[in-house]
Amino acid sequence: MARTAGVSVQTVRYYERAGLLPRPPRTPSGYRIYSPEAAARLRFIKQAQAVGFSLEEVREILRLKYNGRSPCECVRGMLEEKLVRVEREMETLRRFRNELRQTLGRARKLPHLPHSASAICPIIEIQSTKKPRGEKR
Amino acid sequence: MARTAGVSVQTVRYYERAGLLPRPPRTPSGYRIYSPEAAARLRFIKQAQAVGFSLEEVREILRLKYNGRSPCECVRGMLEEKLVRVEREMETLRRFRNELRQTLGRARKLPHLPHSASAICPIIEIQSTKKPRGEKR
DNA sequence: CTTGACTCTATAGTGGGCTATAGGGTTTAG
DNA sequence: CTAAACCCTATAGCCCACTATAGAGTCAAG
């Protein structure tokens, strides 16, 4: 089942431990037997991730579903929230890019400017002090 | 020193362990004694982070400096590379935002469309399968 | 019967930059 | 002399979604 969904065997077992996949029945020797439903659920998890959901969010969606309620309304809300956060992140990134460009601009004229010999790196030290950036995983 | 630089004491000690700050002299009872140079170096680390450098990169810059070479050329190169990566990330984010918008658009008309009752969440399952998104730290 | 490709469990590690906790010692003001 | 406010070390935990490793069992083909 792992292979048909394009994930590793460990990942499937990780999802099971994390409560995202139900515990499947076993053969007498302890091998897991996966139903087509389980495979569908695994595909669903992957699709939800592709849409940008964390496993925690997927858990919540599945919890709603298996409590008999349609998760769609909740999902729509989550997506809207996600859109807002993405737009905010884009703005942050845009500002960061502009700062980077300014810094590079200054770096290009730096050799012509006077700077103290005790400095570690004038390119960096010439900056106005701002908040640190996370920038990535 | 931690306070004047706006970081926690543990962070300073973490930097020392990580080789970013030199091991300072101690009082007889073992307390660290920080020179103004150490404080300057700590400020430098924070500035470099604000410009987007990882501690690993800061380590590299300091290594160059304390081998007697000017790190500026290397820093310029790193910044240019960083700019490229940021622009790539912006593009990724832009595409992701567009997908999110499309998904939300589909979600709004979903109640009017027919979909199988066995689905977990049609909003998600209607997606064309794409690569997963990291989206953040 | 052996070999190779699988399966199982349990546990630990990854990255990055810290933060928290436990258990102790030191310094300074009142 | 005591209490508060520091300092010290060492170790573990956080976040997330996996990935890796060790050690053991199972299954099918030749």
Image (spheres, coloured by chain):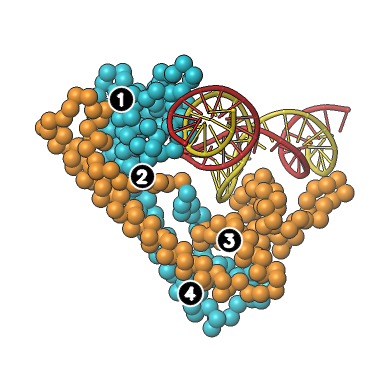
Chain colours: A cyan, B orange, C yellow, D red
| Residue at which label 2 appears | B132
Left or right: C22 as drawn, with respect to A40: right
| Disc 1 target residue | A37
Q: Amino acid at mark 4?
A: Arg
Residue A106 tag number: 4
Task: Point out the frontmost of discs 4 and 1.
Answer: 1
Circles 3 and 4 on the same chain: no
Residue B107 location, quadrant: top left
**Distance of label 4 from label 2 (alpha carbons):** 38 Å
Vertical comparison of B110 with B88: above or below: above
Residue type pointed to by label 2: Pro
Picture residue at 22% right of the left edge, 37% below the top? B126
**Of label 4 and label 1, which has the lower sequence position?**
1
Residue type at mark 3?
A: Glu
Above/below status of B52 relative to D29: below
Q: Is residue B3 left or right of residue A38?
A: right
Q: Give yes or no for contact between labels 4 and 2 (Cβ–Cβ under 8 Å).
A: no
| Neighbour tally class for label 3: few under 14, some 14-19, many 20 plus, Cα within 10 Å | some
Q: Disc 2 to disc 1, how far (Cα)?
A: 22 Å
Q: Do the residues at pointers 4 and 2 share their chain?
A: no
Q: Nearer the viewer, mark 3 or mark 2?
A: 2
Q: Cβ–Cβ below 8 Å for labels 3 and 2?
A: no
Residue B57, which numbered label? 3
> Crowding near pointer 4: few (<14 within 10 Å), some, many (20+)?
some
| Numbered circles on residues, count | 4
